[in-house]
Amino acid sequence: MRFAHFLLLAWFMFAACSVHAKESSVYVSLSAPFCMTPPHPVASFYHARSLEVAECRFRARFRSLPLHLYVVSSDERSWIDLRAGKTIWSSEDEVVYEKENQFGHFPNVGKAPAEIWINPHGVASGMIFRVTAQSPDATLSAGGVSNISRLFVLGFRESGICFLGLARSNQAARGLLAKRTSCKRMLKEELLQ
């Protein structure tokens, strides 16, 4: 009987690993010409807040709805928002305001593509994107500014989209997704009017 329980447990563990192994990465460019002004209701939502927005297109779903990715920017900072249906999740607080994530001045979404993990059914399960900032303590001798960057890792859960953590390398960022790391905080959620 114990052997049967062991086999059953081993099968469930193998099945869980197999499901993860079938996820694939989709890379989404975060720069022009791949990102364009979104349709009117979305553009108006951001312009009413004095923010610029560009939609970067890709194919994935979340909560059975198409998932949309936006690069949002103020005068000196930028971050990523995600939308499914009328719900928008914003990484603004994590990128711009959360004290534990502040590693430099004027954080901005980098030009590096975002990596989105998608299961075989086209459902997003996680995302990695690079944020670059001015180093707070290092300047170049020619009077320029030294930049540093970190990878922000988001998890897609039934309850919404959450912040999993920061990483310095792609391997470490993918490790947070592969281990199904617990959410540190849920992203700010708003409804598109």
Image (cartoon, rainbow, N blue to C red):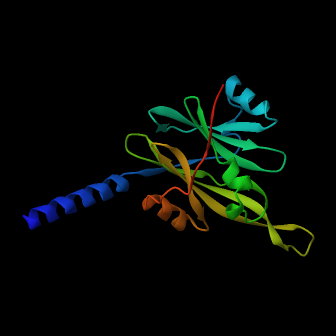
Q: Evaluate whether residue 111 shows in this view.
A: no
Nearer to me, 135 or 3:
3
Residue depicted at 10% across the width and 66% down the height? 2
In the rendered image, the vertical position of residue 164 relative to residue 42, given as above or below: below
Nearer to me, 169 or 105:
105
Nearer to me, 9 or 140:
9
In the rendered image, the vertical position of residue 132 relative to residue 32, given as above or below: below
Residue depicted at 72% across the width and 42% down the height? 72
Within the image, what quadrant is residue 37 found in?
Answer: top right
Instruction: Where is residue 93? Give x, y as percent.
Output: 69, 50
Farthest left residue? 1
Badge count: 0
Instruction: Where is residue 131? Give x, y as percent.
Output: 69, 57
Instruction: Where is residue 146? Give x, y as percent.
Output: 81, 68
Q: Evaluate whether residue 9 shows in this view.
A: yes
Residue depicted at 54% across the width and 62% down the height? 173
Horizontal side of 134 relative to 81 (left or right) equals right
Within the image, what quadrant is residue 148 found in?
Answer: bottom right
In the rendered image, the vertical position of residue 118 relative to residue 182, given as above or below: above
Quadrant where the image shows the N terminus: bottom left
